[in-house]
Each structure stands twice: as C-alpha cells, then as structure tokens.
Amino acid sequence: MSASFASRSPYEVLGVTATSSDEEVRRAYRQRLRETHPDTGGSAVLFHAVQQAWEVVGTPEARAAYDSGSGSGARGRISGAGAGHPLTRVQRVRRRKLARTGTPAAKNVSTTSR
C-alpha cells in the first residue's frame, strides 16, 4: 500500500470493489485488520486506514450513504493518517450510553480509600 491514503477509496484500502457484497467487505476488513495490526508486525498507519475505511463503508447504511456521495468521506476518499483517529471501543460505548440515557457512562473508579 502506498503511504498516501487520502487518494484511496475505502474499497481500495480494504482490497475490494464497490460491487462486493456486504459479507465480502466484512471479510476483507477482518483480513486487513489481521494483516496490518501493529501487535502482529503491521503498521499503525495502515491499521488506522483500514479502520477508517470500515467506518465509511462498514454498515449497509454507511455504505449506501458513501456510494450516494452523502456519507462520511463523500468526496470518494478517506482521510489520511493523522487526520483523526477512530474512536476506541470504550469511547463508542460511552457515546452510545450517553445518547441512550442522557447520562455519561461511569468510569472505573476505585471505591477504596487510600
């Protein structure tokens, strides 16, 4: 993969075509995650690009929005590395809880005093 991801579509980053099925996109995403994960010798930059590509075309709704030109990355390309990192799992869970209940998720706070 080239160093510049700003010029690549999410489909190119995942190694699929725009006509691939949702299942093919999901499989390609999981394969690319394994290939690029920093803990297994991959590059953090490539890993983040794969995650960003998934955010853009990972669900049928997001993919439809991207394909119609109205979704995230609507110009046909994903943002380059360093332009913003995807949310961590913990951040996504906290945002969903806040949206659902209006109350922030409690952080792990020790109840023992020192």
Image (cartoon, rainbow, N blue to C red):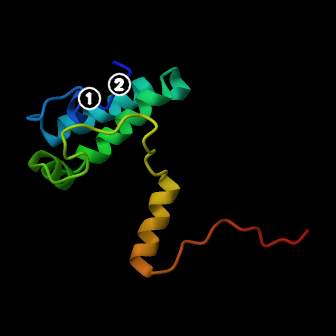
Q: Quadrant of residue 27?
A: top left
Q: Which residue is mark 2?
A: 4
- Residue 74, compared with residue 102, is above or below; it is above
Hey, what amino acid is under mark 1? Ser
Image position, residue 73 (x, y; %): 25, 45
Q: Estimate how packed mark 2 is, as few (under 14), some (14 to 19) or many (20 or more) residues with alpha carbons within 10 Å.
A: few
Viewed as shown, does residue 79 lie left or right of 65? right
Of the residues shown, which amino acid type is indicated by label 2? Ser
Q: Residue at x 44, y 59 (%)?
A: 92
Would you name the residue on which mark 1 appears? 7
Label 1 residue SS: loop
Q: Is 2 situated left or right of 87 in this image?
A: left
Which residue is at a point 37% across and 39% down the rendered structure image?
51
Answer yes or no: do the residues labelled 2 and 1 have beta carbons within 8 Å? yes
Identify the disc placed on residue 101: none
Question: Residue at 38% of width from left, 21% of height from top?
Answer: 3
